[in-house]
Amino acid sequence: MTDFITKLEPEDEFNHLPDASPNYNESMYFNLFDHSSRLGGWFRLGNRPNEGYAEMTCCLYLPDGRVGFMFNRPTISNNDEFNAGGMSFSIIEPFKHLRIKYTGEVLLLEKPKQMINPKEAFTSNSRVESTIDLDIYGISPMFGGEVIRKDGTPLDLDPEKSFSRAHYEQHTKGSGSIKLANEQWNIEGYGLRDKSWGPRYWQSLSWYRWLTININKDIGFMFSIVNRGEGKERRGGLVLENGQHKSIQDCSIETVYDKDRYQKTIIAKAVTEEREYLVKGKVLSLIPLRNKRKTPQGEDLTTRITEAMTEYTFEEKTGYGMSEYLDQIIDGEPVGP
């Protein structure tokens, strides 16, 4: 990659002018977990201005095992901001301070696996009003950006096969309040956020495994294995130690699945220039989601995205985060290992 550089500016925190790709997507994502109460959640807005809608997702993992969930595709007419479907993300200070707000309904799931059949889940569970207000602060440098040529020109992308043009991540801390009907919690903890922009189809990858981990304010991880099919696979990520990121040169993720082939326990190993790391994970609460698309040729494609709040241990220290597993579904089965 000596002919390329990675570019990231504070202005990239704000929304970009969409290119002409019909599937242009600009998205921002946050997760946050309170280590004392084991309350957490994640929040995403993905603007698809050339398709006229946004993808809005709110997912809350409650201490008693219930999950509060909502997904909508609200109409948007531009890519000026992240503000759709009752959710908004505000940039208070780039790379340092952001704010999440959501006011709207969530589906309250006693058995989150009911989302295997979304129609049934939405008709058999109650919806409650929610109000979420969170402040998010960066506790690490930024990781990633847009890969461009050394002369400053962008790379050529095939929109049909692209997942993003640029992507960055950051370990964070956060605090605020979550209210569901007559229940309310204060939350203070750690998490990870990311942002990406460019053409995206969820079906452009074969499978991936993405682990986001905060052991405490000084130790965190992000493990990533992305398989594009045809023998193309990228393994990497980062280690957060005492406020600094170290790049993972190689990693492995071994998974024990339950009877429905959802992740249950995880052993993740990583290698940096300095040392090796071993992190173990145990899923606490899991919700299965999916994305469907019909190709211009009339083929129906289904992607399964399994989102799990996960307890992680590293050197006898315990922390929390996410395990996100994406698989294309072929002949009724997920394709990943």
Image (cartoon, rainbow, N blue to C red):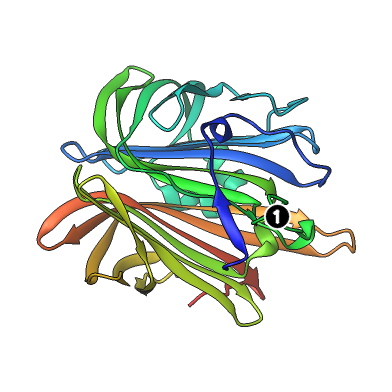
> Is 272 positioned to the left or the right of 305 in the image?
left
- Residue corresponding to mark 1: 201
Q: Is residue 117 visible?
A: no
On screen, residue 86 versus residue 261, left or right, reads right
Amino acid carrying mark 1 in the image:
Tyr
Total marks placed: 1
Q: What element carries label 1?
A: loop
Kindly give the residue lying farthest to the right in the view shown.
Answer: 297
Whole-percent x, y for residue 320 in the image: 26, 49
Which residue is depicted at the point 20% across and 42% down? 217
Which residue sits at x=57%, y=56%?
Answer: 5
**Mark 1: few/some/many CA within 10 Å (<14, 14-19, 20+):** some
Q: Residue 8 in the image: x percent, y percent?
A: 53, 43
The residue positioned 25% from the left and 44% from the top of the image is 243
Q: Residue at x 67, y 76 (%)?
A: 331
**Residue farthest to the front?**
151
